[in-house]
Image (cartoon, rainbow, N blue to C red):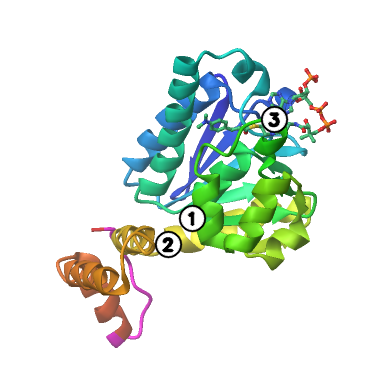
Amino acid sequence: MAFIVTTVEDRVATITIDRPDALNAFNTEVLRELLQEFMTIGHRTDVGAVILTGSGRKAFAAGADIAEMRDKSPDEGRSFAELGQMVTTTIERIPQPVIAAVNGYALGGGCEMALACDIRICSENARFGQLEINLGIIPGWGGSQRLVRLCGSGFARELIYTGRMVDAEEALRWGLVNAVYPQDELMGKAGELASSIAGKSGVMIQYAKACMNRAFDQDLAGGLRLEAGFFGLCFATEDQKEGMTAFLEKRPAEFKHR
Ligand code: DAK
């Protein structure tokens, strides 16, 4: 891979977008590689959590590659949009939780990529924004949908209509990120969070993610039915037996992820 670096250690995969000269902007190749990598990781049973970050100290990702986008035909524009949507949808659908460790700018498509992740944490120098309006376009990789769901309609509308950037503290206030850390601590904190998730039963994490992914797609009664169905499935697993037996035997559970 030319633009993606992946490491796997102790059930935690770290995927780094590695195009620092262009502030990790997404060109077609970056998107193709991200898609391939997330699809591969999604099938790995030895990975329990994923961290997505950007290389360098300035950017998570400054959005879609404006230089590549400018001269696209409508057909090429649609293919590019579909490719980006496939990446965000894949991040959302893989069984493992994905933590965005936002280490600088997360703008336009970069912000949308972070929004598709399960959890976002960031460094103090992080900046978020849906700047598309300044370029004569609107968000195209789910910004108008996921930002509204995550942070509420008023904040999302302000960001999308004005194209202004918000800093880490404001992002924290609106629930766009769960926590803010000094830049040098960010990856360590992301690793701690990922490890704490990867140590749980991978099957249960997958079931919980599947339920929460659907929380906005249906009414409460439908969501509760879905939850009850997955809850029932837990009792077909070794991990449920082990978790409850370990509690009763007053010892830590040793999950086998099955
Ligand atoms: N694309 C391409 N190159 C970029 C880039 C980007 N988004 N952002 C930065 N770069 C490049 C710069 O051109 C520069 O390259 P060189 O000149 O050195 O060759 C290098 O990265 C460093 O950037 P700067 O020199 O500008 O660095 P500064 O620190 O001065 O400024 C900045 C940092 C992040 C404030 C600034 O670079 C900036 O404003 N960048 C653009 C941010 C932006 O507007 N992002 C949103 C992109 S639009 C769609 C779906 C999705 C999308 C569109 C359509 N469909 C469904 C149709 C998504 C759209 C977007 O993401």
**Label 1 element class:** loop
Quadrant of the rendered structure where residue 180 is? bottom right
The relative height of residue 32 versus residue 237 in the rendered view (above or below) is above
Nearer to me, 180 or 177: 177
Residue 252 included in the magenta stretch of the image = yes
Nearer to me, 144 or 178: 144
The stretch in magenta equals: 248-257
- Residue pictured at 39% horizontal, 64% vertical: 200
For the residue marked with disc 2, what is the amino acid?
Answer: Gly
- Name the spot of residue 116 as percent of width and height, x first: 49, 48
**Label 3 element class:** helix
Q: CA distance from mark 3 to mark 1?
A: 28 Å
Q: Is residue 133 left or right of residue 211?
A: right
Comparing marks 2 and 3, which lies closer to the viewer? Answer: 3
- Name the spot of residue 124 as percent of width and height, x first: 78, 55
Q: CA distance from mark 2 to mark 3?
A: 43 Å
Magenta stretch secondary structure, dominant: loop
Mark 3 within 8 Å of ligand 1, using the beta carbon: yes
Q: Is residue 237 left or right of residue 40?
A: left
For the residue marked with disc 1, what is the amino acid?
Answer: Asp
Binning the other alpha carbons within 10 Å of mark 1 as few (below 14), some (14 to 19) or many (20 upward) gives some
Residue placed under numbered mark 1 in the picture: 118
Nearer to me, 163 or 90: 163
- Name the spot of residue 188 as percent of width and height, x first: 66, 54
Tell me which numbered mark, 2 or 3, is placed earlier along the sequence.
3
Residue placed under numbered mark 3 in the picture: 135
- Residue pictured at 19% horizontal, 68% vertical: 229
* Image region (quadrant) for ligand 1: top right
Residue placed under numbered mark 2 in the picture: 199
